[in-house]
Image (cartoon, rainbow, N blue to C red):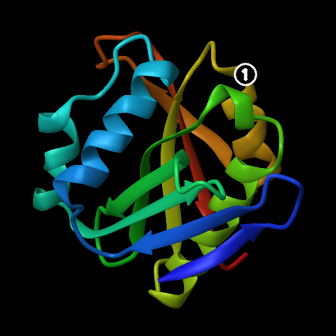
Amino acid sequence: MFFTLLHNPKEIACELHESTLEDECIDELIELSLQLFDIPPNRAYFSRLHEMQSPLVLIARNMNGLIVGYKIGYALSKEVFYSWLGGIHPEYQHQGIASAMITAQHAWCRQSNFTLIRTKTHIQNLSMYILNRNHGFHVVGFDESAIVGKRLLLSKNLFS
């Protein structure tokens, strides 16, 4: 499914995938991830989507068809959706793309009868924390199991 994510000088279109991705698309996500993360996900990391229940991948593309952002999640249970991984190309940050993708993800989750969304963010990632707070998430705990350091656990009730 395709829809317009943002109408602005840098119009952004969004693809919504409810299944695994083709290799070419994964290659594009890996390329973008190299610019976003200290330890970027590799093909094996993205291939974990094959193991996930009800995967949802939102991909934002610019007018030239290049991926400028993505948001990936999957079901933890029939009621709980986990917003797993995402990011926006540095040249496209602070334009509302991440916020629009979160809104689209939450709308899809409501339509799919999920009642709760969970996510994690690194404690030092203040912009991600603020974005999640602005979309109704609340801190519910900490995760110290990650190699990359302590993360905040956040949760949002979709119907409150």
- Identify which residue, 54 or 94, lies in the foreground: 94
Q: In the picture provided, is 64 more to the left or to the right than 136? A: left
Q: In the picture provided, is 15 more to the left or to the right than 28? A: right
- The amino acid at mark 1 is Leu
Residue 75 image point, x, y percent: 32, 66
Residue 25 image point, x, y percent: 30, 53
Residue 10 image point, x, y percent: 80, 52
Q: Residues within 10 Å of mark 1 (few under 14, many from 20)?
A: few
Q: Quadrant of the C terminus?
A: bottom right
Q: In the picture provided, is 11 more to the left or to the right than 9? A: left
What residue is at 72 percent from the left and 29 percent from the top?
A: 91
What residue is at 67 percent from the left and 26 percent from the top?
A: 90
Q: Is residue 77 above or below residue 141?
A: below
Residue 63 image point, x, y percent: 66, 58
- Identify which residue, 84 or 154, lies in the foreground: 84
User: Where, by quadrant of the figure, is residue 19 drawn?
Assistant: bottom left
Q: Is residue 63 above or below residue 42?
A: below
- Identify which residue, 155 or 70, lies in the foreground: 70
User: Where, by quadrant of the figure, is residue 21 drawn?
Assistant: bottom left
- Identify which residue, 129 or 71, lies in the foreground: 71
Count of marks placed on residues: 1
Q: Secondary structure at mark 1?
A: helix
Q: Is residue 76 above or below residue 138?
A: below
What residue is at 48 percent from the left and 26 percent from the top?
A: 142
Q: Tell which residue pokes out farthest to the right in this image.
A: 8
What residue is at 37 percent from the left and 30 percent from the top?
A: 31
Q: Which residue is mark 1?
A: 126
